[in-house]
Image (cartoon, grey):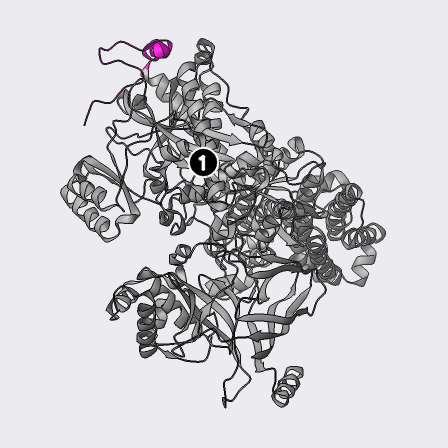
Amino acid sequence: MRIRIRHEITQHFEPGSRNIAVTVRLTPRAHEGQFILRWTLDLNSDCRLSAQEDAFGNVCHTFSVDGPTDRLCVIAEGEVETLDTTGVIRGTVERFPPSLFLRQTDLTEATPAVIAFAEGVELPPDDPLGRLHALMVALHGKVEEEDGPALGGPLSADAALKAEKACSGGIAHLFTSAARHLGLPARHISGYLAPEGEEEGDGKARHWAEAYAPKIGWIAFDAGRNLCGTEHYVRLAVALDAMGVAPLRSTGLDIEEQVSALDGRAPQKLAQAQSQGQN
Amino acid sequence: MLSRTADNLYWLTRYVERADCLARILDVSQRLSYTPVTYGGSTNEWASAVLTAGCEEEFVARYGPLEEAKEEDVVSFLAFETENSSSIRNCFEVARTNARSVRTALTSEMWDVINSAWIELQNFPNRALTRDELARFLAFVKETSLRFDGATFRTMLRNDAYWFARSGAQLERADNTARILDVKYHVLLPEKERVGGPLDYFQWASILRSVSALTAFHWVYRDSVKPWLVADLLILNRQMPRSLAACYEQLARNLDDIAGVYGRQGPSQRLARSMQARLTNRTIEDIFQTGLHEFISEFISDNNKLGAEITEQYLT
Amino acid sequence: MPHAFDEMSSTDGSVRPAYETLQRWLSSVPQDVLDHRRKEAEFIFRRIGITFAVYGEQNAQERLIPFDIVPRILTKDEWGRLSRGLEQRVKALNLYIRDIYTKREILKAGVVPENLVYQNPAFRPEMNGQRVPHDIYVHIAGIDIVRTDPDTFYVLEDNARTPSGVSYMLENREIMLRLFPELFSMHKVAPVDKYGDDLLATLRSLSPRGGHEPNVAILTPGIYNSAYYEHSFLADKLGVDLVEGRDLFVKDAVVYMRTTEGPKRVDVIYRRLDDDFLDPLVFRRDSVLGVPGLMSAYQAGNVTLTNAVGTGVADDKAVYSYMPDIIRFYLGEEPLLPNVPTWRCREPDHLKYVLDHLPELVVKEVHGSGGYGMLVGPASDKAQIEKFRAKLVADPANFIAQPTLALSTCPTMVEKGVAPRHVDLRPFILSGSDKVRIVPGGLTRVAMKEGSLVVNSSQGGGTKDTWVLDA
């Protein structure tokens, strides 16, 4: 499937800010189920963009804006060709062995509540894949997905569990936290989801998880939608939690985002999205 | 040098200078308050002390109307209260915090003065002081600023750090002198009372005392105390180290020295020079004619503006 | 508890040769003279402002560390053995950290378990594959040493992040020289004041830019940090700028400081700020102490951070227990300085032993420091032990245990005169691109309370001047 993506982020700063450093993680990499046809990054200010790789092999750009300014706008735009791999992710850039992804972070901390939840799921023994599926189903039944993320980023695993309601990022935190606690390596993924079939909308930015099953490899689990990855997903970045995949990090005030991810073969929808983007 | 270091030095010296000025104001107010009214003593001397210190809003919020200001309240407010951001205690506190942040830019002698003063300050009780204790306290504050100036003068390298430190002190000193004049200008105006009456003498003398210039006055003018001469001494006389003209002469030179080593002039040099020129070219008659009050208000505002220019150009 | 080894007196009451002169002098000087000198020392410390802050104490914002005026003496021979062992240890630490962040051979060889690295909060994925200038990670190390008998010096702890205390080593010597010039005339004491020069030379040798006078700065969290005095002290000794995060900014992967003359490029940053706070774009995003973009400059190789980021992976107490193996693995040598035997509570059979022997062991948190959160079995009552047992059972991987060592004692001035008190030693080891430098001596910490084994300043410990005799 061919997916057209446009991701616009506006970061606000205190008026008159100078020498602002910014890191963006807005460039997807290819793997067996995903091929980047074209991709561009555009900024509203003149500065030197040089690509670096972060700890997990994501492409990121750190740059500085001299200012004075109160606003920075970044637009990522491109086309990605995807294949359905039944959720199995191969051919990615891997900088660590899977066991690194047993590492918890502040956002995925396995609190007593999370531990109780993880250990309460009825898991088939000796079948990692089956265990992961069981965890996803249980989580889907437990936590309802809402639009998001709220201001300040996705909820932590603990908060998502207690609220029983979270955005896709909060749900991914809970999934990775519980899986890691059960000894199953898991990681946090950011990306885009294009509408499927007759679904309405322009597509959106989304977080989900990947978990590792020996002999199979990394598998995408979207507990919010209770399914493994499909060709409608575009994988942007991987890390230990939502902080690690944040599309833009700086020291400013609030952030606004506008995203569209559309079937590249549907010209009428595309025209709509573009005109919206120009508003 | 680091902008923050320069900023800390500049504020360190400003706060030491401010503490010294507050001590003098309290000193003079106390003296006037036990001078009989018939000799120029006044009952609202404490109110004008608060006005001169420039913190009437905070004071009123805490103690009520200024006209009813009482001695013990004003003393404790200006000297000790932590709620008053520019009480003497806070000035020392802030000065030491700034000094700690730039210890590497201070000589050990300068640090020693500030740190010892801060330690000694802890020994003064946090309650209303007896007049005796207050006198000792004020003497301690004045002595500290003298020792600090001396340590600065005798031990610091003559480089940008020194000039930033001196600029802070001069700017603050000019501001203090101007504010004393601003609060008291009415007693200098001729129409107020028949010139030479006892009431005026004590008021004028107290202005001179608040900048330690009573003796200097007689040496300079060899005349009895007259209001326009008092104004002349404090505004235009370059021999008098606390006069506006003397402060600006120093200030303009310090800023030029900075520009010299950096090889670049800027808005603060231009503003300082133009103010210096204004103080050199005016006469006191001239100032009285166009309005003493207006002159001083404008000066205070321009002086603040120079502070802002220095900050913008070097300290951020 | 076994009888502690006293560094001055043998069990038969005779005085060891290195201490003979000092002992004679101590017994010839009246107590009130010593008292007077001690007060004078305290006055000088207060006056100079050599203070530290104790976390969790609101009103005691600035406290003095008690200074003991009786020096501790090591012979040239003892020091020689120590310094060779220290150099070996630091070499191994550096090789280990490089390996952990590049090829991970030691993990593949199964010498150190993988989860000890990957689950370690001090492990920084961001450092993976990151080459650091000259392959040195720990440029400034502080290795804590304890002694139990004439011949045995144990390594108690490795400090590979931002070890502090060196200002006390230097100031203690200054004050001793001032107060007791006569004592120095009776001994040949190796000087320590070269440390400042050595540190500067080390830092300059690490500049990523050739052909330039390197611009070195010390990065401090600010005046409210407990070690702020040391930061400003070092900046003064080195003649370099003491900067806070807000004094620096990053442009196009280059670090600059804001000066009165405009931006000035920075080459080497001796940071006294924990990894977590260095760069809000990479680590804790609420950090206002760090420099946004610093890691991008670091990764681009345009600035050297000392110590490198992520060195904490080598200095927690669980990794400590593997140090002898780590030394053998990289250097093919036997450790010159032994480890204290350590039980890793993460391992079930170790845990069982520890739980069975709590009253006789010292149990510490793996990531703890400053003497917080530890149990000294023999000095604790039943209730304290049971309370600790619960903590230990709840999270065993977070603890290690060691036998209660009879730390050596040194003569120390206390209320009633001179009496033996337990001591440890922290020497400072500098690793530059050119060579390793160790100033003879270090910081001796002393437990001022009788019988106490906790020497940490935050727990009321004091310090002593440490003399290495040159002959």
Residue C346 at least partly seen: yes
Camera-side residue of A66 and C322 = C322
* Residue C50 falls left or right of residue B279: left
Which of the image's four quarters has the C terminus of chain A? bottom right
Q: Position of residue C411 (x, y in %)?
A: 31, 20
- Image vertical order of residue C435 relative to residue B72, above or below: above
Quick one: B19 or A125, which is closer to the camera?
A125
Q: Position of residue B69 (x, y in %)?
A: 50, 60
Percent x, y for residue C8? Answer: 31, 15
Label 1: how many Cα within 10 Å (few below 14, some 14–19, many 20+): many
> Residue C393: percent from the left, percent from the top?
21, 50
| Nearer to me, C177 or C395 | C395
> As drawn, is B223 to the left or to the right of C415?
right
For image coordinates 75% across by 51% down, the residue present is B235
Chain that bears disc 1: C
User: Which kind of residue does numbered mark 1 sit on?
Assistant: Leu
Q: Does residue C46 appear in this view?
A: no
Q: Quadrant of the N terminus of chain A?
A: bottom right
Provide the residue designation for mark 1.
C93
Outermost residue on the right side: it is: B281
Vertical side of C280 occupied by B106: above or below: above
* Range covered by the magenta-colored residues: C2-30
- Could you tell whether C59 is left or right of A242 in the image? left
Residue under the image location 58 percent in, 61 percent down: A59
